[in-house]
Amino acid sequence: MSESRVIDQILEMEIEFDLYDQKIDGVYFWERYRFHLYDKLLNQLGFVAESHHSPDLGPINRIKIILSSFKNFIFKNPFVTRKTTDILFLGHQRRKLLEDGLWWDIYTDPIIEYYLEHTKSKTLSLEFYQKGSHLQPAKTNNLFYLDYLIFKANIRKMYFKRKFKLKPDERNLLLKIRSYLQDKLGIEVNTIEDVSDILILRRSYLPLFNKLLKKMKPSIAILVIGYANIREFFIDACKLNNIPTIELQHGIIHPDQLAYSYPEKQEKRCFADYLLTFGDFWNENIDFPISKNFVYSVGYPFFEKKVNKFRDIIPEDQILIISQGTVGIELSRFAVDLSRKIKNFKIVYKLHPSEAEVWKEIYPELFVESQSGSIEVVSDHPALYYLFAKSKIQIGVSSFAIIEGLAFELQTYLINYPETQFLNYLIEKQIVHLVNSVDELIEKIENPKAADSNFRQNYFFKRNSLKNIIDKIEDLRN
C-alpha cells in the first residue's frame, strides 16, 4: 500500500459515485469531506505520524485558558465592537515572534501594515485560537478573536446533533463509500459520522458568520487557509453576502495535495473566489478548483523581505537540517548518525514550531547528541532565514522551508522517505538531490556536482510581492 494508491482510489471513487454532484442536507458534501477523508486514511495506514506534538496543559493552564476566553468575550469580541471595515482578514493563528517583540501573522500583517500607513482603507482581522489561546502582543491592527463565536457554535452544535438525521438515500450513499474504502483499501471509515459532523458544524457556524459579516460590511474578505471546515463556512457566508473572497497561499502546494489539487476543470464551490500564489510555478503545476483566470501570481512579502535582509551574509561550512513533525523521529536519528560520521561541518537541527516544547522527550538521541556539542538544536532563534544565509547545505524531507532555502542558493538534499514524493518535481528538474542513507549523503557532499542553476527564484517567488498584492486587492475590490 502506498500514498499514491490511496489518492488513486479516492480519485476513482469520486468519479464512480459522481460525488461532486451529490448533495447531503442540501449541501455538496464531497468537496468538504475529500481532504478530511484523505488525511484520515493516511493516518490510519500509518503513512503520516502526528505532526503536532502538544504537551499536556495541566489543570492550572486550562483554567487560565478558560478565564482568558471569557476576557476575550468582552474585549476582543467582534460581535461587540461597533467597527465596520473595508477589508476583512481571517488570518493564521500560528504567529511568529519577530525582532520587534511582536507576534506577527507573516501572511497578512505586511499587507495590513501597508494599508495602515499608506491608505485610508479600514482593515479588521479575525483570529481563531490555537491550543486554547492567542499569541500576544500581536502585531495585527484591529484584531478580534473568534472565541465567542466558537463558544456559541458549540452550543448550537449540541442542539443540531440531536436533531440531525440523514435521509435513506443519503445514508446509503455514505455506506457505499464506506464499503468501497473497505474493499479497495481494507480500511473501516465511519463515513456517516464524519459527514454528519461536518454538516452539523456547518449548521452551527454559518448563521454566526453570516451575522458577523452583515455587521462588519466588508467590501472584500482575505483569508489564510481555505480548506479547513470552519474556514469553508466563512467562505460560504461571504458568498451568501456577495463579498468576494481571496485566499493567500501559505505554504507548499503539490499535485497530490487534495486540499488544492482537483481533477481538471472540477470546481470547488466553497473555495475562495480568487487565489493569490507565491509565483508562476505553483499556477502551472497544480490544477486548482477554480478557473485559472482567478489564480494570480503575486509573491510572498515576508519571505522577500528576509531574503533581501540576509543576502550579503557569508555562508560557513554549516549543514542545516529542517525538521518536520511527520518524520521527526527518523530525521532526528539521521541527524545524529550524520554528526558522528561527517567531518569539517557544523550541524544545525532546526525544529518545527510544534516540536519546540517537547523535542527532548520525543527525540532523546538528538538531545543526548546536542549535549555533547556535535549538533546545535534551535527553535525560533536564530531565525530560519539567518540560518539559511549562514549555511552551505540544507537537508530535509518535504517541508516548505526547503523551497525557501533554495532561494539562498543552498545545496539541497532530500532524504528518501515516503513524504519526499511531494517534492518530486524538484527532484525531476534536478534542483535538489535525493539520498537514501547518511553514507550516500556524505559521499555526495564530499564530491559535489556543479551548482544547479535550475532554481529560478522569481518563478517560485515573484518579486515586488507587496506591490503586486496591494494592486490585485484594489483591482478586485473595484
Image (cartoon, rainbow, N blue to C red):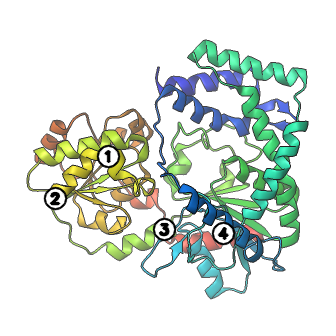
- For the residues bearing labels 4 and 1, Cβ distance under 8 angstroms: no
Residue 294 in the image: x percent, y percent? 69, 54
Residue 359 position in % (x across, y down): 36, 52
Instruction: Name the kind of residue labelled 2 in the image.
Output: Gly
From the image, tell me which residue sits under label 2: 373
Q: Which residue is mark 3?
A: 96
Q: Which residue is mark 1?
A: 363
3D distance between C-alphas at marks 1 and 3 = 24 Å
First of labels 4, 1 by sequence position: 4
Q: Earlier in the sequence, mark 2 or mark 1?
A: 1
Kindly report which numbered mark, 4 or 3, lies closer to the viewer in this rendering. 4
Q: Is residue 82 above or below residue 399?
A: below
Say whether residue 132 is left or right of residue 463. Answer: right
Q: Nearer the viewer, residue 357 or 441?
A: 357
- Please name the amino acid that badge 3 sits on: Lys
Q: Residue at x 39, y 38 (%)?
A: 420
Q: Quadrant of the C terminus?
A: bottom right
Q: Earlier in the sequence, mark 1 or mark 3?
A: 3
Foreground pick, 124 / 59: 59
Upstream in the sequence, badge 4 or badge 3? Answer: 4
